[in-house]
Amino acid sequence: MMTGEQYIESIRSMKMHIFCLGEELETAVGHPILQPALNSVKMTYDLAQETEYRKLMTAISSLTGRTINRFTNLHQNCSDLVDKVKMQRVLGQKTASCFQRCVGMDAMNAVFSTTYDIDRKYGTDYHEQFKKFMIYCQDKDLTVDGAMTDPKGDRSLPPHLQTDPDLYLRVVKRRSDGVIVRGAKVHQTGICNSHEVLVMPTISLGEKDRDYAISFAVPTDTEGITMIIGRQSCDTRKLECSCQDVGNCKYGGVEALTIFNDVFVPNERIFMNGETKYAGLLVERFAGYHRQSYGGCKVGVGDVLIGAAALAAESNGVAKAYHIKDKLIEMTHLNETLYACGIACSCEGHPTPSGIYEIDTLLANVCKQNVTRYPYEIARLSQDIAGGLMVTAPSEKDCQNHATGPLINKYLAASSSFSTTNRLKIFRLIENLTMGTAAVGYLTESMHGAGSPQAQRIMISRQGSLEKKKGYVKSILDIE
Ligand SMILES: Cc1cc2nc3c(=O)[nH]c(=O)nc-3n(C[C@H](O)[C@H](O)[C@H](O)COP(=O)(O)OP(=O)(O)OC[C@H]3O[C@@H](n4cnc5c(N)ncnc54)[C@H](O)[C@@H]3O)c2cc1C
């Protein structure tokens, strides 16, 4: 397995095409806006080296028998599924941000079982090819970006009826040695600091959308791939070299609009090519795993926010007030409910025909549906507890200025147990998590990541077994 430092150097050695704030970058490494995202992914490597976390952060490869980072694991049983959620919670606690490596892990597991099913139906050999790709990722300990979401143009139209056919990623040419693809993937989490991108279709597809039923993996510095970094609220504070004002200057997440402009994909890296009937299954499997993920990662970040709210209350001198204690209880209750859902859908997992385990889909969708709501309520309560300084506190530079610093110290002092600087740092972290750069990961990603709320409601309605439930009533009441 790679060390954290080796991971950073491996990304530095790649020649990706990254644009950020109107400029092309040589590399994401060292850029003030992007480095925190690299630091978060680095944590997934660092913890795997630590004795305390080694058991949680690693697994034995089902393909090679070698020890691998859990982020490249194919889940072999329910215990693997549970450990995945526990690992994600720890990483949320350590980084207070999106650590980006989950999307690829969820994509790997979804593509593994789906290629097995496709091969059984059509006699193709995608699964063997995908196994080779998996062994490569496991042995090299790679970070893989999971790319599902297309720009989608007019949402009421299928891919082939869009005015611009490139609004969904598609095959534009089939050759004897591979395919040429064109299109884009939006909101790509951590792609500028990933080694590989694993592409999947974004929706169920009909026969006329055959060219859109494509899944493949290529290195992120493949010719034709361009990444345009998305803006996050307050992102340019990171350019001001003030750690205090950023709130969490060590860790962060990043997303990018990623263009595939006539990218060549060799045959051995193609895992679906025209099998439209399996696009929906792949989407559902990926979404299921990813909806489980949020029952771990967002809970870890929630732990940090609850801790920050408790410290803010102490620094304000209100920690003993009944309503503050009650709000912290409510935040904990909401956060642990999310965790309970993440653990429950893992414990109730089952094997797929390929042998690897998937989560209980209904419970994973319930998990994600709660995730679209509870972090917002936890954020609201943390803002209530913090008070207005969270958004009106002066800058770090004003704290350091000899004319204003002493005034800030005098007038923004509260509990004698906290220096004014530490008090402001806590407020800034709450600001960062609830409305700054980290709110992208903690809130908006909770809403739309792994599918918008309605997507889960559709799955819940499909799996809610209403007929069975009506049957219980009929049987109790002796109704035919
Ligand atoms: C921070 C963040 C990180 C992300 N990371 C990744 C990633 O790493 N990889 C990846 O592949 N994706 C990623 N996503 C994408 C995520 O899966 C999508 O945002 C999600 O699927 C919603 O798609 P959309 O953003 O295009 O919104 P839309 O699909 O436009 O949804 C907007 C609203 O319109 C509704 N809607 C959409 N289509 C229809 C329709 N046909 N009929 C009725 N209502 C409709 C939705 O329910 C929703 O309410 C990320 C998203 C975010 C916000």
Image (cartoon, grey):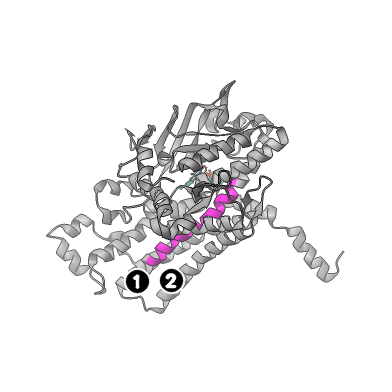
In which quarter of the view is residue 341 placed?
Answer: bottom right
Pick the front one: 346 or 421: 346
Residue type beneath disc 2: Leu
In which quarter of the view is residue 432 placed?
Answer: bottom left
Pick the front one: 90 or 402: 90
Q: Are marks 2 and 1 in contact (CB under 8 Å)?
A: yes
Q: Residue furthest top?
A: 176
Q: Disc number at residue 313?
A: 1
- The answer to whether residue 221 is visible is yes
Instruction: Say which quadrant the C terminus sits in.
Output: bottom right
Does the magenta-highlighted stretch encompass residue 360? no
Distance from mark 1 CB to nearest ligand 1 atom below 8 Å? no
Distance from mark 2 CB to nearest ligand 1 atom below 8 Å? no
Q: Specify the principal SS of the magenta part.
A: helix
- The answer to whether residue 301 is visible is no
Q: Residue furthest right?
A: 480
The span from disc 2 to disc 1 (Cα, nearest Å) is 10 Å
Crowding at dot 1, Cα within 10 Å, few <14 / some 14-19 / many 20+, comes out as many
Residue type beneath disc 1: Ala
Q: Which residue is mark 2?
A: 328
Helix, strand or loop at disc 1? Answer: helix
Crowding at dot 2, Cα within 10 Å, few <14 / some 14-19 / many 20+, comes out as many
Q: Where's residue 319, x and y in %?
A: 36, 75
Q: Where's residue 127, x and y in %?
A: 63, 37
Q: Where's residue 361, x and y in %?
A: 64, 53
Q: Which residues are magenta?
A: 286-307
Q: Residue furthest left?
A: 403
